[in-house]
Image (cartoon, helix red, strand yellow):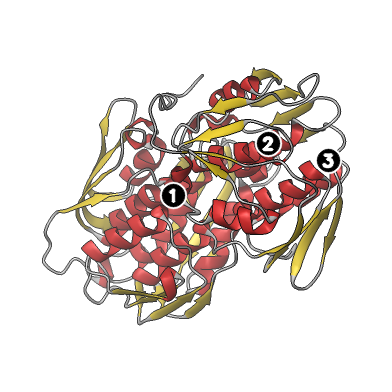
Amino acid sequence: MKSPSSAPETAVSAAVTVLPGGPVRGQIRPPGSKSLTNRALICAAMAEGVSELSGALRSEDTSVMIDSLRQCGVGIDVSEGGRSLRVEGRTGWNRDGARRDLYVANSGTTIRFLAAALSAAGGRYHLRGVQRMHERPISDLVDALSSVQKGTIECLSPGGCPPVEIDSRGWNANPIRVAGNVSSQYLSGLMMAAPIALADVAEAAESRPGQVQIDVVGELVSRPYVEMTAAVIRSFGGRIRIEDVGAEGTKSATTEGVSTRVIVDGDGYRGITYEIEPDASAASYFWAAAAITGGEVTVLGLTPQAMQGDVGFCQVMEQMGCRYESGPHGMTISGRAKRGIDVDMNQISDTVQTLAVVALFADGPTRVRGVAHNRFKETDRIGDLACELRKLGATVQEHDDGLTIVPPVGGVQPAVLATYHDHRMAMSLSLAGLVAEGVRVLDPSCTGKTYPEFFADLETLIGRPHRWG
């Protein structure tokens, strides 16, 4: 089923054309991971004591998280251009008990992580965003929270979409069941909220649950993000384990349909000093620049042992014919992506758009599988992506779980491309201009959601200016 999507831009104040040139060669360190920054902010905000976060991302998604936490009484000092955050924990948390009206723009991590955390912490909250946010389903998470909610939590838009209204006195001890096939952020939000429910925040100690059990029903998409969440929780002192439910024949009635079980216990979070990795999703654009042009790009600060699963994009480029090398200080892609591939991108779905642009310059079709949930992101990242790739001359077939891309005969065509206010559409589609003439991308400022300096960093890497307007 095609998700609702923002209409393509019909009038915008700016556009960018990345100009063609030779092979892209160089090194770059992307800004901090959005995923890690917002996870660390949740844990630090609910911790006992002060946390110092370094390497944080400065972007719209992290800004709305910081603003919302501040409105709830959390002290957050920002320095070094947003890269360093001092978080005072929950000492001032919602002290007056007033209803908080929190604006999350179009940040999926913010609304999903906050909805779960605020439900566990207790209080009254109204979470709202832009129109597109009010079209992105969140009912699976809200239904899961309803099973443990002391009080009420509900979606206010048709189809189980935000705004979300919360009136909470914390959680009870019931087990939680959540669908795993729409967004791993639902599970991540529940996991991070569990230590909050176990700490003495909303209720007296004797009324708190002793542990939290979360059962994932059906397929779990984007598993690396769940493992990342667990690692962050452990860093802040939370106790958590993830269990794959046994094979058929060993399951009980209580595990029917369950693929994964998460158990959380302990007594909450503690303040720490925490360093945030560079953003691996952002890194994919620079690795792709090498793969499209036959150059060589090293992304500094990431290794195959990084917490972020999107470093696996390098292995996908290797399958397409690039050379992949890693060392203690970075990961390098060199050479052109020569051949199309058939690949399951379920575990690294935020890099599908990047791969799609690389596929335009490969020999033969590329089939992307396992990403049906991409239709429910900032835009429909299957249907809307297919529309823009066709403008470039590709033949694209949509599937329930992905798409097939056949490169254009005679090369990529000049085109004016819509971004649907989706940062990943803008960053990925602009890369086609590294080789092809006349690829004009509308509304480039939407990259501010996760990477405000993207086009400046790309310009520095390739050594030539873009054309604006």
Is residue 407 rendered to the left or right of residue 286?
right
- Mark found first going from the N terminus, 2 or 3: 3
Are the residues tagged 2 and 3 within 8 Å (C-beta)?
Answer: no
Of 15 and 403, nearer the camera is 15
Which circle, 2 or 3, is nearer the viewer? 2
Q: CA distance from mark 3 to mark 1?
A: 29 Å
The label number, if any, that marks residue 432 in the structure image = 2
User: What residue lies at 62% left-to-right and 32% top-to-bottom?
Assistant: 439
Is residue 310 rendered to the left or right of residue 100?
right
Under circle 1, the secondary element is helix
Q: Residues within 10 Å of mark 1 (few under 14, many from 20)?
A: many
Under circle 2, the secondary element is helix
Is residue 56 rendered to the left or right of residue 459?
left
The label number, if any, that marks residue 337 in the structure image = 3
Q: Which residue is mark 1?
A: 449
User: What residue lies at 75% left-to-right and 33% top-to-bottom?
Assistant: 359
User: What residue lies at 30% left-to-right and 42% top-to-bottom?
Assistant: 129
Under circle 3, the secondary element is loop
Residue 134 x %, y %:
32, 34
- Mark found first going from the N terminus, 2 or 1: 2
**In the rendered structure, which amino acid carries the disc numbered 2?**
Ala
Of 253 and 293, nearer the camera is 293
User: What residue lies at 46% left-to-right and 31% top-to-bottom?
Assistant: 420
- Mark found first going from the N terminus, 3 or 1: 3
